[in-house]
Image (spheres, rainbow, N blue to C red):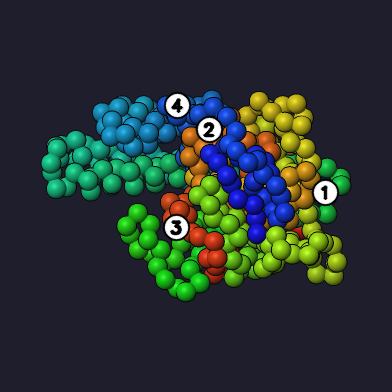
Amino acid sequence: MVSKALGAFITASSILMPSIALADKPLNAPSAAGTRVNSDPESLLRYGLPVTTKELQDITSSIESVKANLRTRRLPFAQIDLKKAEERINKNGEKILTSMPASHKAAAQASLARLKQKISPVAEAITAELNAGQGSLQQQSYLDLANTEENNLSAELSTFAELLVPDDYKRDIPEEYKGLPVLQGRAEIEMVIKKPDNSKYDVDGKLYDQVKINMVIDGYNAPLTGGNIVDLVNKGYYNNKKVDRSDGFVIQVGDNTQCGEECPEGTVHGYVPSGSTAERKIPLEISLKGDKELLYGISSEDEQRGSEAAVLPFQAYGALGMAREEYDANSASTQFFWLLFESDLTPAGKNLLDGRYSCFGYTITGADLLKGVKEGDVIKSAKVVAGADRLVL
């Protein structure tokens, strides 16, 4: 069994693997309550891209402001931001195209055209919502439609932005880790979780037969961690694995045993490649803003850089982190966790996870359903649905 969290803020030892001690009381970390925290996984992935332009950043800022204002029902402000986004796309879209890699220009041109087309449906839905007035039976459906169309717009923005990254972009991997799988770019994994007795999940009063989620694995900032996970999914490792831990803070899976903390000393909890007797382990892998190279085998705190921001921060519900032993930075193998992010528990930029654990991606659909997952639930299937060709073995 994995160790259990005992408070709102926990030590590094609490996210992990079997037989790890943890603090007996919460730590006094400052709260991010009252501040605006970017907890949008797709936004965090866009900001995590290794290539961008000032013009694209301006467009991104406007479109993300539309989403924020829709969420808080500040519809006139959403209209203003949408108009600004449209103006910036029309003014600078072609300029951004000139920065695209030659092999991506055709796809980028098509994406830019779709980006322009997806402005109008958002604008029309917002206008319909404003015209409906308070008390209208149609009001909520118009607002829902506005959010849906904005999500489509944001998804296209992500597609367009990622096309800026050259096909040959890759991180330098230290020589001692070059035998490990590498994810060059991003991949998407679909996972289905069910209860062992096939009963339903009750999430916020709505019943579900299963929890189906999609996760983007980011090989730009976690090529070894991402490569390890994608390789294991391809091998079917997580199929029929039970959830090892669900405590309201994290959901953790991947232990290859059923004995947990009761296992005899020396028990292998991770993946042993065919033909080998040794467990495959991967190093702690941290991407800090402004750095060309990644940190390997050491936390940002131990590197005396604990205050610096991570490119992939643990500040989205369903953020993906690699579990490891407390005192061994290079001990991760198969166990990973979803962080059930709450800004009061893990304040952005001040939590105890950034720089200590490898964040390797985010849950982009179905994250809200994770709150219903309990210890003992079963991963019925896990498969790579996009980006499998980016895995280098």
* Position above or below: 365 against 383: above
Element assignment for label 1:
helix
Decide which of tag 2 and tag 3 comes sooner along the chain: 2
Mark 1 lies on residue: 177
**CA distance for labels 2 and 1:** 32 Å
Asked which secondary structure carries label 3, the reply is helix
**Residue with the mark numbered 2:** 347
Q: Amino acid at mark 2?
A: Pro
1 or 3: mark nearer the eye = 3
Observer able to see residue 222: no
Residue 178: horizontal and vertical position, in percent? 83, 50
Q: Residues within 10 Å of mark 4 (few under 14, many from 20)?
A: few
Residue underneath mark 3: 372
| Inter-mark Cα distance, 2 to 3 | 23 Å
**Nearest to the observer: residue 113 or residue 174:** 174
In three-dimensional space, the C-alpha distance between marks 3 and 4, rounded to whole angstroms, equals: 27 Å
Read off the residue under disc 4. 35
Q: Say whether marks 3 and 4 touch (CB < 8 Å).
A: no
In this picture, residue 178 sits left or right of residue 360: right
Marks 2 and 1 close (CB-CB < 8 Å): no
The residue at 43%/51% (across/down) is 368
Q: Are marks 1 and 4 in contact (CB under 8 Å)?
A: no
x and y percentages locating residue 329 in the rendered image? 77, 44
**Residue 212: % across, % down:** 47, 61
